[in-house]
Image (cartoon, helix red, strand yellow):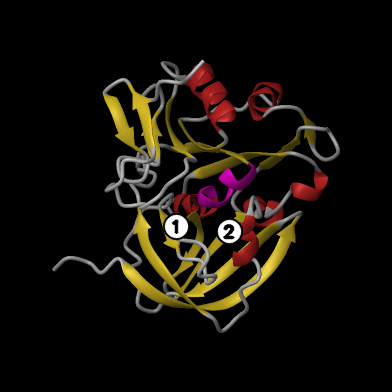
Amino acid sequence: MKKRLEHKMRVKGQERIAKETFRMTLDAAQAPFDFLAGTFLNIALPDGRFLLRRPLSIFSASKERNELSVIYKILGEGTRSLAQVAPGQILSVVGPLGTGFPIQSDAKRVLLIGGGVGVPPLYELGCRLKKEGTQVTSVLGFRDRESVFCEAEFQTLGNTIICTDDGSYGDHGLVTEAIATHGLDFDVLYACGPSPMLRAVDETFQGKKKGYLSFEERMACGIGACYGCMTPTKAGLRRVCTDGPVFSLGEVVYHD
């Protein structure tokens, strides 16, 4: 039987966790939980002015509590409208969607690399890896001190290094610089964040390490029908929403 993708989910909680950054918890009693970490939900905004849904990565999932949570940053009027949603409201949610992060069962040491709103999907992945007995190290980059979120949650997974662009908190500089400075070694890396960060990670480690990158891209339908989120790869153009958002190191071709 084909799984139902569209669900009506009640908002259980909404809280501000950093500068213009919110965590929303959804009642997911009717949603499937057999998905890979790194997949996303496509959420319809309650304001009828907005036609397109907003794709938001799953931050955490609890089958025991029937909850899914997402983290998002206010980037425009759509996400500003989402931040006004109150507990008890019902949202139309499609998902989980996308390919997600494949788990490498033979990896004993894993490095999670996140940048800004690319950080959230790495937490659920880290939780699953830790349950498997994998050593998890995280390097997370943010713009400034006020933008840092979920440091404590990642610390429960293992050693966590925070970087800020302006040096106001943690290491001053890029995540790739922090990895070199701290002499971090690992078997597999998983990364999610803005394209310049992913490109730097890709160019630093492809051919040297095994790894997977999750790309952020504007989406219209989220299910591969509109071809609005095409990205160039060595195998040709691919849809981020269905062929991704996760691709292997060395797979994506970057624009100069």
Residue 50 placement (x, y as % from top left):
50, 62
Name the residue rendered at 49%, 40% in the picture: 216
Amino acid type assigned to the residue bearing label 2 in the image: Gly
Q: Secondary structure at mark 2?
A: helix
| Residue highlighted by disc 1 | 52
| Residue highlighted by disc 2 | 78
Tell me whether the residue at label 1 lies in contact with that at label 2, contact meaning CB atoms closer than 8 angstroms.
yes
Circle 2 crowding by C-alpha within 10 Å: few under 14, some 14–19, many from 20: some
Name the residue rendered at 41%, 37% in the picture: 107
Name the residue rendered at 63%, 78% in the picture: 86
Q: Quadrant of the N terminus?
A: bottom left
- Which stretch appears magenta? 116-122
Amino acid type assigned to the residue bearing label 1 in the image: Leu
Q: Secondary structure at mark 1?
A: loop
Name the residue rendered at 75%, 27% in the picture: 173
- In the displayed structure image, the side of residue 140 where residue 41 appears, left or right: left
Residue 223 placement (x, y as % from top left):
31, 52
* 236 inside magenta stretch: no
Near-viewer residue (28 or 207)? 28
